[in-house]
Amino acid sequence: MLPNRDYNRKSDPERLDWWREARFGMFIHWGIYAVPAGIWKGEAIPSLGEWIMRNGKIPIDEYEQLAGQFNPVKFDAEAWVALAKRAGMKYLVITSKHHDGFAMFDSPCNPYNIVDATLFGRDVMAELAEACQREGIRLCFYYSQAQDWHAPGGAGHWEEADGPDWNKQTITDERFAQYLDDKAKPQVRELLTQYGPIGLIWFDTPVFIKPEQSQELADLVHQLQPDCLVSGRVGNAVGDYGSMGDNQIPCGPVEGDWETPATLNDTWGFKSDDHNWKSVKDLLYLLVDLTSKGVNYLLNVGPTAEGEIPQPSVELLEAIGEWMAVNSDAIYGTNPSPFPYEMQWGRTTAKDNMLYLLLFDWPSEFRLSGLRNQVKRAYLLADPDTDIAVTQSHDAATDQHLLQLALPADAPDELVSVVAVELDGPADVHPIPQQQSSGAVALPAHLAQMHKAEGSEMTLSNTGVAAMWKDTDDWLSWEFMVDRPGEFDVRFILGTLAHRRSSAAGHSVTVAVDGQSVGGVLTNDEDVDTPRAQYFPEHATTLGRVTLAAPGSYEISVRADAIDDSAAHGLTMASLELVPAN
């Protein structure tokens, strides 16, 4: 399990039960920024649609005029909630107030809101609350607690922000505290007293909020609604669960409770020129991948200024819903994969005595090493009445367990097919990496033993990337097992901590195993195609070839011979791979 670094778990564990069961939710970014839709005075403003005020440097008095133009006459709460339900989503998180400071709800404490400042004049949150209640979807609110570009004292306030460092503290502690008391806390109170039971408050971008201020907000939420969750982005590790970065996926199963917010295209709030829609395949892979790591998937839609969810979003979510209608047992209420490393053929989840194999690729021969349980039955979720033949073996000399499944010739699903495996108890897996069906061995950085020099900065990120590797006296090692010996190419995978920015290459490393060593200079020439690498790029370098002559256990190590001093995060490693030659 990856380390739990970003928050503590002081909340009542039962408060999280519904959220752990849900696994999949709808995010909605909607506000008056949908009116310009990424275009200001004829110019396309780069980056995110909901950030147009900041990125377009729009003065407050000009931006306020968008409220008078906002009239979403096509808004239909029932349609939105029905779409979430068809997609298989169990909760809905909508922006009640984003960084632009405009409240998308009836806010008696502040007139800058959808009821008092627009021609529309309706409280969309009240309508959504009623629809969610009818459909059994939990309503949740996003609220930007620290950033407010409109309100005096808010972080990043347009008239007080200072050049490119606007997100650093440019206002006094006293003015910021006054903003919290005058606007943020009263509006949070309104959200939790006007709309019935709320599943969670999704705070965001704490920037320079102080620990006691984060705690006060969390306490306010729990005081008003004891069962309401507080997201990790309230800041200062006081949330009920952790939040990964936007579109961020960990390298392996995580400890604790986590969620990843993700986009269908590149923006969150609607932009008229963003047509870079993900494929159904990519979205399903992300859902499966995150679930296998124990991470909830909060997938965003950005409605138009008229109140419609774009048709491509509808079609993508409905396609996911069709898959979920057949395969949701492998998603809802599951635990992370008992295998602490990723499988090349897909992912696994577990629940009670069930192990679910979610296959991206449909193999002619399926082998799974390391499962120590006895299998009682295997079948397809798409065809639960038909058994799959199972063969199990155990080599006592090497302590290697092998499961083989006689899969049908054709995959039941074009994208992700699910095999349900009933075990004689909760999944019991050998703790060290095993050779996979393809013959490859995956050695993620988070499973390595870190050998750190005195004063070393080397650390493991919450996503499982080894980072701050700046000392050539640091090194990593793994134990692993093979049942099919032979020649293997050694591949080093560079990871990254930065959104859409590759790690620095140019470092030199040496890998040693079974008396052999290979090495070389790491490059960014070969992209790694994984769901994770869509927004956090990874790159592979093949260092050379080694021979493992016999089945059994081996130890492998990687050392840095030279590290580029200019790399801010040092050498950043996602994994090592042994791939059968040819």
Image (cartoon, rainbow, N blue to C red):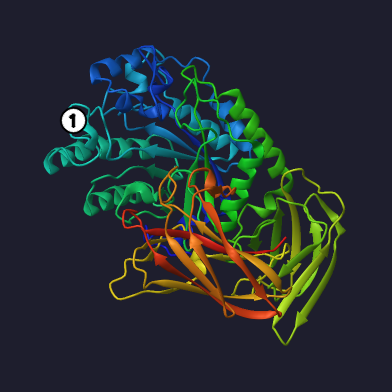
Q: Secondary structure at mark 1?
A: loop
Taking 400 as reference, is 545 left or right? Answer: left
Q: Position of residue 96 (x, y in %)?
A: 39, 32
- Residue 555 point in image, percent of width and height: 56, 78
| Residue drawn at point x = 81 percent, y = 49 percent | 411
- Residue 354's place in the image compared with 210, above or below, is below
Residue 461 as seen in the image, left or right of residue 455: right
Residue 389 appears in the figure: yes
> Residue 142 versus residue 228: which sits nearer the camera?
142
Q: Position of residue 212 (x, y in %)?
A: 22, 53
Which residue lies most toward the bottom here?
Answer: 397
In the figure, residue 551 lies in which quadrant?
bottom right
Where residue 426 sits, quadrant-wise, is bottom right
Which one is nearer the viewer's eye here, 156 or 483? 483
Amino acid type, label 1: Pro
Q: How many marks?
A: 1
Which residue is denoted by mark 1 in the rendering?
152
Q: Residue at x 28, y 37 (%)?
A: 147
Given residues 538 and 301, the one toward you in this image is: 538
Which quadrant is home to the C terminus? bottom right
Q: Is residue 155 visible?
A: no
Mark 1 neighbour class, 10 Å CA radius: few under 14, some 14 to 19, many 20 or more? some
Looking at the image, residue 482 lies above or below residue 365: below
Q: Is residue 343 left or right of residue 464?
A: right
Across and down, in percent, residue 477 comes to 50, 74
Q: Is residue 69 above or below residue 211?
A: above
User: Where is residue 435, by image quadrant?
Assistant: bottom right
